[in-house]
Amino acid sequence: MALVWLPLDDETIDRMLVLARSPWTPAELDRTWAATGWALPGGLPLAAQVFDDLTYTFGTGDRLLRLGMRFDPDEITSFSVDFATYSDSADPDAADFGGPDALGAGWSVDPDATRADFDARWREGVDAVAARLGDPLIGRHGRRWHHALWRLRDALVVVAQSENSDDYADVEDALLCVAHHPGDTPIPRDEELRDFLLGA
């Protein structure tokens, strides 16, 4: 078993909430990105990188920001950042799935972590976002994963455990995701939430 984590900080949460409350169209994405306060990756306009160069992963200091996309027409469906990654494999090399050196100096590693430790890191992430948005809707999806949800206008803010986004075997992430979701549609819960996250 192994766990790497970097707790959600106020700055990351605030910037993700700016994204949740702002438009993501090609014409407006650069203005939205500027409002977050994150530097332009590579100094190049973000809209060109996403919609012309088809780049969907960007560094933001010690974290990676991933974009979800829908195509024809091209549109951004979500932004997400991981704050914990867990492996329950007994393989002694299982900790080598990104680790603090690959992710940034602020990350911690526990090669002896348990699933309870992973759940605790998720709960800390929920509490950090709840300090901004109030009490969430709490649920479970899959056999062992937890999620918390808030609605902001036409977006959902989700703190969830899920499959690792880089498709490592036996590896799971805890992530903060802001995803497009029309305000007049039901909030996905339980198993629907897993499908929503995979498509977001």
Image (cartoon, rainbow, N blue to C red):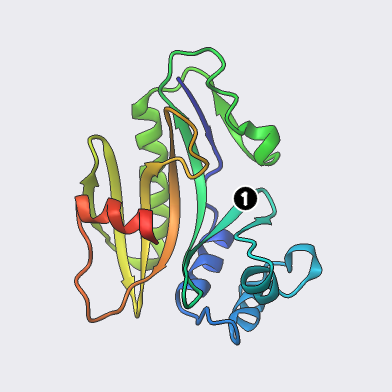
Residue 123 image-quadrant placement: top left
Residue depicted at 44% across the width and 13% down the height: 90
Instruction: Name the kind of residue labelled 1 in the image.
Output: Arg
Quick one: which residue is furthest to the right in this view?
43
Query: Disc 1 marks which residue?
Result: 63
Residue 140 placement, left or right of 35? left
Query: Which quarter of the image is occupied by the C terminus?
Result: bottom left
Q: Nearer the viewer, residue 131 or 65?
A: 65
Q: Position of residue 2 (x, y in %)?
A: 49, 23
Residue 180 placement, left or right of 141? right
Q: Position of residue 15 (x, y in %)?
A: 56, 67
Residue depicted at 67% across the width and 73% down the height: 52
Residue depicted at 45% across the width and 22% down the height: 113
Q: Position of residue 16 (x, y in %)?
A: 51, 66
Q: Image height check: is 115 above or below 93? A: below
Residue 145 image-quadrant placement: top left
Query: Which quarter of the image is occupied by the N terminus?
Result: top left
Residue 143 placement, left or right of 46? left
